[in-house]
Image: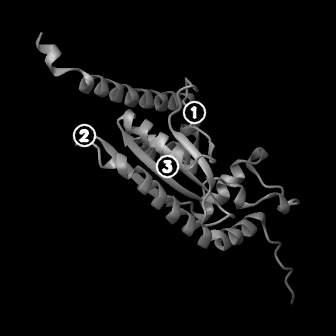
Amino acid sequence: MSFAKAKRTIEDQLREEYFDLLPDIRRVVNELETEVRYCLLPISLRLDKYERLEVISRIKECESAVDSLRRRQEGATFDSERPDLYSLRSLNDLAGVRVLAFPGSRLEEADQALRRRFPEWTPKPVLGFDDPAEPLALKYYGYCGASGRVRAEFQIVPMHTALFWKVEHSAIYKPSPGLKGVARSLEMQQRTSDVLKALKAFEDEFVNLIRRDPLAEGH
């Protein structure tokens, strides 16, 4: 009895490509994290006790990479007749580093320092819900010396926003099937926007208070 050979899917093709690229991804994320930490060291050494500057690296997992590429296609589906159209090398964030900063002045310093170190990298800021002119986070992508096959990304994010995203990512950005209706609702989008605004308002007020001259309040 013979069995017809199952046709290899585009997802299978991309999974195979992922594991071929994985050694490059690991080298790239190690190089990028080292470069970012070294670049930000002068700022880290000047931090006041209430200020924060943290560096976190991550490698995009295989299924997350395949899903990410799928979402970029028309109708969020692959054309099974055109497997040559798809490659994980088109993604900008197989390797990534995130810089968490508080307060905003340190975020701006980090951005300036990293732009000097990576002048050729392409900016792609994370835009806000209501005011695109004031992005939620700064983001850049490009190639490291460790590999010409894998693009990497670094983000510079207000610390409170980044911590909220850590929760929001699973609940809203990439929800389980049972939560997709909740995540897409206008009410949930509005509440998410409200949280991000409140976090920014908290930071703005804190910065205003610490900048106030203590002696001025006594007059």
Q: Is residue 12 left or right of residue 56?
A: right
Question: Which label's residue is closer to the chain start, 1 or 3?
Answer: 1
**Residue at mark 1 to residue at mark 3: CA–CA distance:** 20 Å
Q: Residues within 10 Å of mark 1 (few under 14, many from 20)?
A: some
Q: Is residue 171 in view?
A: yes
- Estimate the x, y position of residue 127 in percent, counting from the top left: 57, 33
Query: Quick one: SS at disc 2?
Result: loop
Q: Which amino acid does label 3 sit on?
A: Ser
Q: On the image, numbered disc 1 is attached to which residue?
A: 127
Residue that protrudes farthest toward the bottom in the picture: 1
Tell me the residue at 29%/44% (across/down).
Answer: 46
* Eye-nearest disc, 1 or 3: 1
Q: Is residue 2 above or below residue 118?
A: below
Q: On the image, numbered disc 2 is attached to which residue?
A: 50
Tell me the residue at 25%/41% (across/down).
Answer: 48
Tell me the residue at 65%/62% (across/down).
Answer: 150
In the figure, residue 198 lies in which quadrant? top left
Question: Which label's residue is closer to the chain start, 2 or 3?
Answer: 2
Q: Is residue 29 left or right of residue 72?
A: left
- Estimate the x, y position of residue 162 in percent, counting from the top left: 43, 43
Query: Quick one: SS at disc 1?
Result: loop
Q: On the image, numbered disc 3 is attached to which residue?
A: 170
- Estimate the x, y position of residue 155 in percent, counting from the top left: 51, 46
Q: What residue type is labelled 1?
A: Leu
Q: What residue type is labelled 2?
A: Tyr
Q: Any mark on residue 148, and which? A: none
Query: Quick one: SS at disc 3?
Result: helix
Question: Which label's residue is closer to the chain start, 2 or 1?
Answer: 2
Q: In this view, does 183 lie above or below 187?
A: below
- In this view of the protein, which residue sits in the foreground, 170 or 6? 170
* Eye-nearest disc, 2 or 1: 2
- In this view of the protein, which residue sits in the foreground, 171 or 199? 199
